[in-house]
Image (cartoon, rainbow, N blue to C red):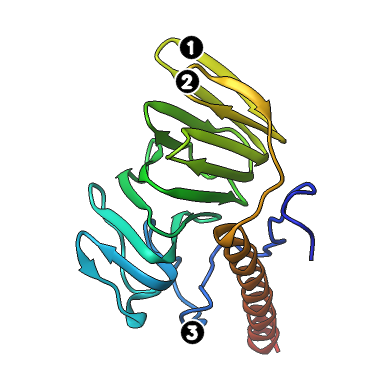
Amino acid sequence: SSDLGTPMFLPKLMLLTLFVASAPIRVAAAPPVGMLNSFEGEAWINGAPLRPVNAGTRTLEVGRVLRTDQGMAELLLTPGSFLRLGERSELTLEAIGTPDVRARLNNGEALVEVVALEVPIILELNGVTAVIRKPGLYGLDQKHTLLTVYAGEAQFSVGVDQAIVGKGFSIGGRHLRKFALSAPGGSLYSWSKIRSEQLSDESAAFAQTDRKSTRLNSS
């Protein structure tokens, strides 16, 4: 498999109707936006602790908060885009559907992987707004007010100030200071890579099952 930093670790998903590794693969309708795809360790939605059975069945609704302690969690933002929340982090889902999907990182860190950009994805962090413009991989660090484009392109804004940033750069602080990113790493980065590979394998298996079903129905 490819490495996160060169240039991206996005899986080659054959279908954007995805079913997470934490739940059985089913031939069914696409899961809803805000679905809790997977989590490990300690996590809560609006103060209610999550259990393993919630993966693939629980949805984060608009205005609700997803929080982790010694754990990490993955949300389906849109078909083909995933937000992964790191340890000791907190996120509010502010809008879903049309005209856009909007999420605010209140604390900690997150990674957003976009395989297919179905609708505008808007991320908010300490007064900085990022509009994802292309498929790619994007990092958010609330403590340091740092937004990173590992792959792809995003438009950042603070008030009337705006900047478009491409792969390999970060925006730091409320003055949109642009600088080259450091080498990625950490537990969230590693877990995100694992999840990406799992989703890619799952999509390939789903596509193979679908092809077999099509051949049987046509014979």
SS label for mark 1: strand
Residue type beneath disc 3 = Pro
Residue 25 place in picture, x, y as percent: 52, 82
Tell me: 114 left or right of 90.
right
Residue type beneath disc 1 = Asp
Q: Outermost residue toward the top? A: 160
The C terminus is located in which quarter?
A: bottom right
Check disc 3 and report the residue beneath it. 24
Q: Residue at x 31, y 69 (%)?
A: 58
Residue type beneath disc 2 = Ser
Taking depth in this image into account, of 215 and 99 the one nearest to the observer is 99
| Mark whose residue sits in front, 3 or 1 | 1
SS label for mark 2: strand
Whether residue 156 is situated above or below residue 52 in the rendered picture: above
Label 2 to label 1, Cα distance in Å?
A: 6 Å
Q: Residue at x 44, y 36 (%)?
A: 122
Q: Quick one: label 2 or label 3, which is nearer the N terminus?
A: 3
Whether residue 109 is situated above or below residue 209 in the rendered picture: above
| Image quadrant where residue 16 sits | bottom right
Check disc 2 and report the residue beneath it. 157
Q: Are marks 2 and 1 in contact (CB under 8 Å)?
A: yes
| Other residues around mark 2 within 10 Å, as few (<14) / some (14–19) / many (≥20) | some
Residue 143 place in picture, x, y as percent: 43, 39
| Mark whose residue sits in front, 2 or 3 | 2
Label 2 to label 3, Cα distance in Å?
A: 40 Å
Taking depth in this image into account, of 146 and 3 the one nearest to the observer is 146
Whether residue 42 is situated above or below residue 211 in the rendered picture: above
Check disc 1 and report the residue beneath it. 161
Q: Residue at x 28, y 65 (%)?
A: 44
Residue 151 place in picture, x, y as percent: 69, 42
